[in-house]
Amino acid sequence: MFYVYILYSPSRDKYYVGYTSNVQERIIEHNSGATNYTRSGKPWNLVYKEEYALKSEAIKRENEIKSKKSRKYIENLINSSGG
């Protein structure tokens, strides 16, 4: 399985959208500083995820979310999921 996930950084008041096959491992990587963009926003909290059978589907959805360039769109996703 593959996942599209959204993390939130309270310290930066920013969201991060990504995809992975292991959400928990990826969050650990973000919070350990392994990713340049997320290094300064620790701690990052998982606020949303979607599951896909194919990697290509997850990448397509990640790009769709990012292409919106909209905080409001992201927050609507999170709120509609009960997050």
Image: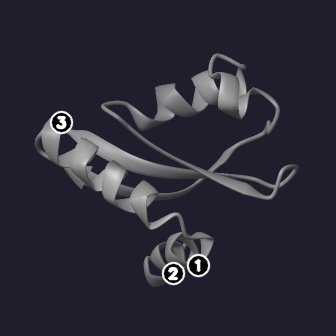
Q: What is the distance, in whole Å, between disc 1 and disc 3 at their CAs?
A: 26 Å
> Considering only vertical position in the picture, is 35 above or below 18?
above
Counting from the top left corner in percent of width and height, residue 30 is at 63, 28
> The N terminus lies in which quarter of the figure?
top left
Q: Tell me the kind of residue under disc 1.
A: Lys
Counting from the top left corner in percent of width and height, residue 9 is at 75, 50
Image quarter for residue 71? Answer: bottom right
Q: Nearer the viewer, residue 80 or 12?
A: 12
Q: Which residue is mark 2?
A: 76
**Label 1–label 2 contact, CB within 8 A:** yes
Task: Tell me if mark 2 has few (under 14), some (14-19) or many (20+) residues whose alpha carbon lies within 10 angstroms of its own.
Answer: few
Q: Tell me the kind of residue under disc 3.
A: Lys
Q: Secondary structure at mark 1?
A: helix
Q: Secondary structure at mark 2?
A: helix
Q: Tell me the kind of residue under disc 2.
A: Asn
Q: Nearer the viewer, residue 21 or 38?
A: 38
Q: Nearer the viewer, residue 36 or 79?
A: 36
Image quarter for residue 81? Answer: bottom left
Q: Secondary structure at mark 3?
A: helix
Q: Which residue is mark 1?
A: 72
What residue sits 75% from the left and 27% below the top? Answer: 39
Question: In the image, which disc is placed on residue 62?
Answer: none
Counting from the top left corner in percent of width and height, residue 28 is at 61, 26
Q: What is the distance, in whole Å, between disc 1 and disc 2 at their CAs?
A: 6 Å
Lower position in the chain sequence, tag 1 or tag 3: 3
Q: What is the distance, in whole Å, between disc 2 and disc 3 at their CAs?
A: 24 Å
Task: Tell me if mark 1 has few (under 14), some (14-19) or many (20+) residues whose alpha carbon lies within 10 angstroms of its own.
Answer: few
Q: Which residue is mark 3?
A: 55
What residue sits 69% from the left and 33% below the top? Answer: 38
